[in-house]
Image (cartoon, helix red, strand yellow):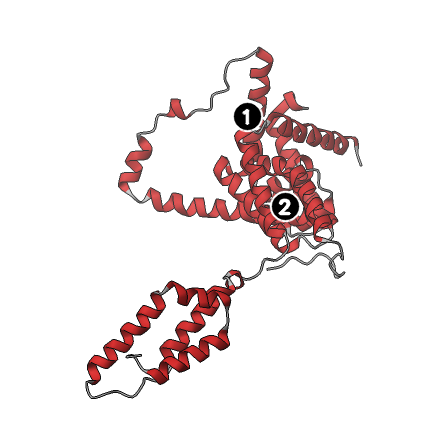
């Protein structure tokens, strides 16, 4: 390396050092950089479970209850068919709104839920 | 697109060790990275955005790589992001220039109020600030590749090989760009820096 090249390299080091020395980063920016770093580390951390796995099991059981109630075949209609359908829908809504029904879902006793749905089907909306 | 530096497998280290090493690396590089991005972008928020993207992308995609590769990968991502922001700004500037009401708004700004304020202080501080402003202006005036080579080699302190990875070019190109950058800066800044 020639003398001129060495001088040029030295100039580059001085200029680089000056740029670093002169550029003080204020406290607010330092704080934001630290926050960004924390977010990056969070992103690099162990993989989280997919969001749908975070839904409580009870909620999934409740959803299963809803699905059973909504998809079961309708009971045979009595003569006043229209009123009976409306009554069945109201019954289902009442069941959905019933806190006890959600408590059943929380326990995730799917066999019982299936059984209960079968029984309600046999008994019909009038009980 | 994933950057490929080596064909070796990822490191079989625990997540805690990786996170500690990554934290150490990012803490060491973040302020210099912000300075480098700010010199290129002349905007604090944009510079923070660029550093944030580089940190997140490195953490998400390359945290399992050999930590020796992180500096080059990080700066490659950072340089790409800086370039994106510069392009976006150029496009925005061209679009805004076509809007008459924006032109009026731009003309309404007070150039005195917009001028950088070196602030009061001893003569040495003022002189130092003046030199720093001149240096930053000279660096900004460099062609993009020369500016990148100078910032990565002389400010960040990367070696030629890592700079080549960060810039996406050969070692020889890095040497050429860096050499020309130094020549241009010395010519521009004059005797006070030699």
Taking depth in this image into account, of B66 and A34 the one nearest to the observer is A34
Chain-order first, disc 2 or disc 1: 2
Pointer 2 residue: B75
Residue B64 visible within the image: yes
In the image, is B57 to the left or to the right of A68?
A: right
Q: Residue at x 53, y 63 (%)?
A: A53
Q: Which subunit holds the residue at mark 2?
A: B
Q: Residue at x 64, y 47 (%)?
A: B74
Pointer 1 residue: B133
The x and y percentages for residue A110 are 49, 74
Taking depth in this image into account, of B81 and B86 the one nearest to the observer is B81
**Other-residue count near label 2 (Cα within 10 Å), few / some / many at <14 / 14–19 / ≥20:** many
Label of residue B113 in the image: none
The x and y percentages for residue B152 are 66, 40
Q: Under tag 1, what secondary structure? A: helix
The x and y percentages for residue B1 are 59, 60
């Amino acid at each position: 390396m020639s003398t001129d090249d060495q001088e040029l390299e030295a100039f580059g080091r001085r200029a680089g050092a000056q740029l670093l020395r002169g550029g003080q980063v204020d406290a607010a920016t330092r704080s934001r950089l630290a926050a960004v770093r924390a977010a990056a580390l969070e992103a690099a951390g162990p993989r989280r479970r997919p969001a749908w796995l975070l839904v409580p099991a009870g909620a999934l059981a409740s959803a299963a209850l809803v699905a059973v109630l909504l998809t079961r075949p309708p009971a045979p209609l009595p003569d006043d068919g229209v009123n009976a359908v409306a009554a069945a829908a109201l019954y289902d809504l009442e069941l959905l709104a019933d806190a006890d029904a959600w408590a059943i879902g929380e326990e995730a006793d799917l066999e019982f839920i299936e059984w209960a749905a079968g029984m309600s089907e046999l008994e019909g909306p009038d009980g | 697109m994933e950057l490929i530096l080596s064909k070796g497998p990822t490191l079989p280290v625990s997540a805690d060790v990786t996170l500690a090493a990554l934290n150490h690396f990012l803490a060491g590089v973040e302020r210099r990275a912000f300075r480098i991005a700010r010199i290129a972008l002349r905007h604090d928020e944009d510079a923070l955005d660029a550093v944030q993207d580089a940190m997140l992308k490195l953490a998400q995609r390359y945290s399992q790589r050999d930590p020796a590769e992180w500096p080059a990968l990080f700066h490659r991502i950072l340089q790409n992001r800086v370039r994106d922001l510069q392009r976006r700004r150029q496009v925005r500037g061209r679009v805004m220039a076509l809007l008459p009401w924006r032109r009026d708004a731009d003309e309404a700004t007070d150039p005195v109020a917009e001028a950088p304020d070196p602030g009061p202080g001893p003569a040495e501080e003022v002189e130092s600030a003046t030199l720093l402003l001149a240096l930053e202006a000279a660096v900004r005036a460099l062609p993009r590749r020369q500016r990148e080579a100078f910032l990565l080699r002389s400010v960040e302190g990367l070696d030629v090989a890592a700079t080549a990875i960060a810039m996406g070019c050969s070692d020889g190109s890095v040497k050429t760009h860096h050499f020309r950058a130094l020549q241009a800066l010395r010519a521009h800044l004059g005797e006070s820096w030699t």
